[in-house]
Image: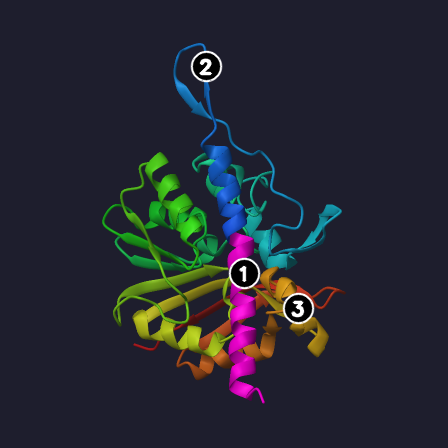
Amino acid sequence: MTSGNENGSQRFQDIQDAVSERYSGIAERVLAEAATVDRQDTGELTLDFIQNVDPGQSCCVSDQSDPSSANCGSSASELSDVGGERTSKGSMLYSEEQAAELPDSALDASLGCGNPVALAELNSGETILDLGSGGGIDCFLAARQVGLDGEVWGLDMTPSMIRLARWNAEKIEAKNVRFRLGEIEDIPFQSDHFDTVISNCVINLSTDKARVFREVFRVMKPGGKLRVSDMVWTRNISQEERGDAEAWASCIAGALPLTEYLEIITRAGFVDATADYEDNDRGVTSAYVSAMKPR
């Protein structure tokens, strides 16, 4: 007879495998395209990048046959307008001004449901951690805000995403950004290290969100800030909706009810946990979640 623990472990592994396969495939595709080199008349080497994200690639909920139906909620829509019009690349949640200073290979691998850096209130000289950093887009935006006196770390469990992020960092000569392989349930950094922890549509992918937030609390300095964009449910959901590993990897089934999400953050030790979002008839939306570690 199979025990409950064995069933739980297998479910965790199935979900982790589905998430890893999905995001590894995206990173490898972008890396392959970025490695395609054309020689212009000037003799200089230029990189030929993908210009549009695949339908359904983002964590935003959409009909894959109609990517324009993506609904990330008001927080994502508002954040996308910071500093200019929406970009047509990546997750379409970054301004043209932001996108212009980033490699297309970072935008094309962006799978977020918001722009947490836009409202993170980062300061020069701070140390930042991005959970599930993917191609590095939020790390690079954060790096500009903290300056060369600051430091930004990206953490991702997918080796191909780490390779892509490091490739992007080298391309834009990001001196204060580094990437590390690891899992958000077991953050490989010392305690009381980061001023701010950000994440963009990644924590919902974890099957142990309570452990994630305990780890975030541990590595954050007293008085540190948590700034997360994530998918949440605003209605009751069925076991069937929670059960599909591929839906989980698409940032839907793994999302929690908003009240439960905030309760887990509070139980981890954070204070002032709040969320900005706009409800919709689907019952799942993106929310901008903030909290802080007491001093």
Magenta stretch holds residue 294: no
Q: What number is the disc on residue 40? A: 2
Q: Nearer the viewer, residue 32 or 146?
A: 32
Per the picture, the main secondary structure of the magenta-coloured stretch is helix
> In the orientation shown, which residue stands out farthest toward the front?
1
Q: Earlier in the sequence, mark 3 or mark 1?
A: 1
What residue is rendered at 59% in x and 58% in y? Answer: 75
Q: Amino acid at mark 1?
A: Val
Quarter of the image with the N terminus is bottom right
The amino acid type of the residue labelled 3 equals: Asp
Magenta residues?
A: 1-23
- Looking at numbered disc 2 in the image, what kind of residue is underneath it? Gln
For disc 3, the marked residue is: 244
Q: Nearer the viewer, residue 134 or 28?
A: 28
Seen at 41% across and 78% down, the residue is 270
Which is nearer the N-term, disc 1 or disc 2?
1
